[in-house]
Amino acid sequence: MVSSPVSNAPQDRGLLRLTRGRCAGCAGAGAAYPLQSWIFAKLLTVIILPVQLLEAASRHWALMFFVLGLGAAVAYFSLGWSSTTISTYISCTYRQQYFESILDKPIPFFDEEENSSGTLTARVANDPTQLQQMLGMNMALVYTAILSLVGCIIIGFVFGWKLTLLTTFVAMPIILTAGFFRIRYEIQFESMNQAVFAESSKFAAESIGAFRTVTSLTLEDLICNRYEVLLRGHVTAAFHKSKYSTVVFAASDSVQLLTMALAFWYGGQLLGNGEYNAIQFFVVYMAVINGAEGAGTFLSFGPSKYSLYTSV
C-alpha cells in the first residue's frame, strides 16, 4: 500500500532538515584544512617574537587551534549523524518497496531463469545496501574532500599565487592519485586475500562438518595433506597477485616526499628573493600539500563505480 502524501510530509520535512545539516557538516569539515593551514602558519611565526610577547601569542593561537578542533568535531558529528540517518531511512524504504514490488509480480515472472528465488533474495539484500553506501558516510567524505580541496586552493591563491600554481598543477594531482591508490590498494589487498583463501576455508568447513565420515574411514591424514596442498597453492597465488599491487602501494606512499621537496625548493627560492614571507610560504604549503594528502585519503573511501551504477 502506498502511503498518502499527507502522511509522508513530516518525514520529508525531517529528511530536508537532515540534508541541510549534512550540507552544513560537509562545509564545516571541508573548511578545517584551510583554516588549519593559516593558524599553523601564524603559530610557527610566534617563535620569532620577543620573549615578552611570546607567551601571550602562543596562548592565543593555541586557543584558536582548540576552537578549530571543537568546530571540526561539531561538523563531523553533524555530518556523520545526518548521513547515517538519511542513508538508513532511504535504504529501509527502498528495501520495503523492492520487496512489495517483487510480491506484486505475476507468476510467469518467477518462472524466468534470471528471476530465481536465490537471485531475487540477493537483489533484495544487495541493492539497498549499495544505495545506502552511496548515500552514507563514504560519499559524505568524498564531498568533504572536494570542498576541502577547493578551500585549500582558494586560500593558497590568496596568500601566494606562484607557489600555489606550482603545487596545484604539479604536486596536487600526484598527491591525490597517490593517496587514493594507497588506501584503495590496501582495501583491495585485504579483499583479494579473503577471495584467494576462500576455497581452502570451504574445504576445511566441509571436512569438519563431515567429521564422522572422516573418522570412520580414517581419512585424517588424507584431509590434512589435501588442505596443506591447497594452502601452499593459495599462498603462491596470493604472492603473484600482490607483487604488482605492492609496487604501486610503495610508490604511492613515497612519491609524496618528492612533491614536498619540490614545494620546499621553489618556496625557498621565493623566500630568498624576498617575494614571500614565512607566513605566505607555510600557509600555501600546509593548505595545498597537506590538504591534498588528506583529501586523497578521503576520496579513496568513496564507493566503486560499479556499486554506484548498480545502486541507481
Image (spheres, rainbow, N blue to C red):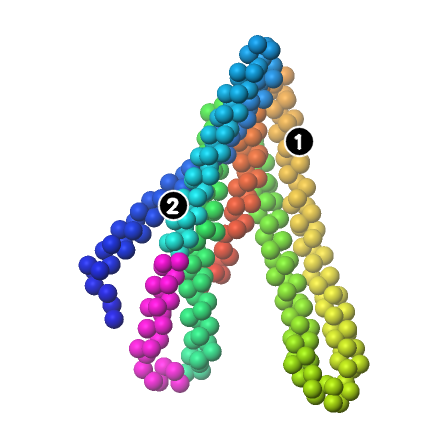
Q: Residues within 10 Å of mark 2 (few under 14, many from 20)?
A: many
How many marks do you count on the picture? 2
- Alpha carbon of mark 1 to alpha carbon of mark 2: how far? 37 Å
Would you say residue 98 sits in the magenta stretch? yes
Q: Residue 83 at what x, y percent from top left?
A: 41, 50
Per the rendered image, the range of residues in magenta is: 88-111
Question: Amino acid under label 2?
Answer: Arg
Main SS of the magenta part reads helix
Residue drawn at x 66%, y 49% is 249
In this view, the residue in front, 154 or 10, is: 10
Secondary structure, mark 2, is helix
Q: Residue 296 at what x, y percent from top left?
A: 55, 44
268 lies above or below 141:
above
- The answer to which of marks 1 and 2 sits earlier in the sequence is 2
Q: Residue 96: which disc?
A: none
In this view, the residue in front, 298 or 50, is: 50
Question: Amino acid under label 1?
Answer: Ala
In this view, the residue in front, 264 or 142, is: 142
Q: Residue 219 at what x, y percent from top left?
A: 77, 85
Q: How crowded is mark 1: few (under 14 residues within 10 Å), some or many (20 or more)?
A: few
The residue to which callout 2 is attached is 22
Residue drawn at x 48%, y 51% is 138
Q: Residue 261: which disc?
A: 1
Secondary structure, mark 1, is helix
304 lies above or below 44:
below
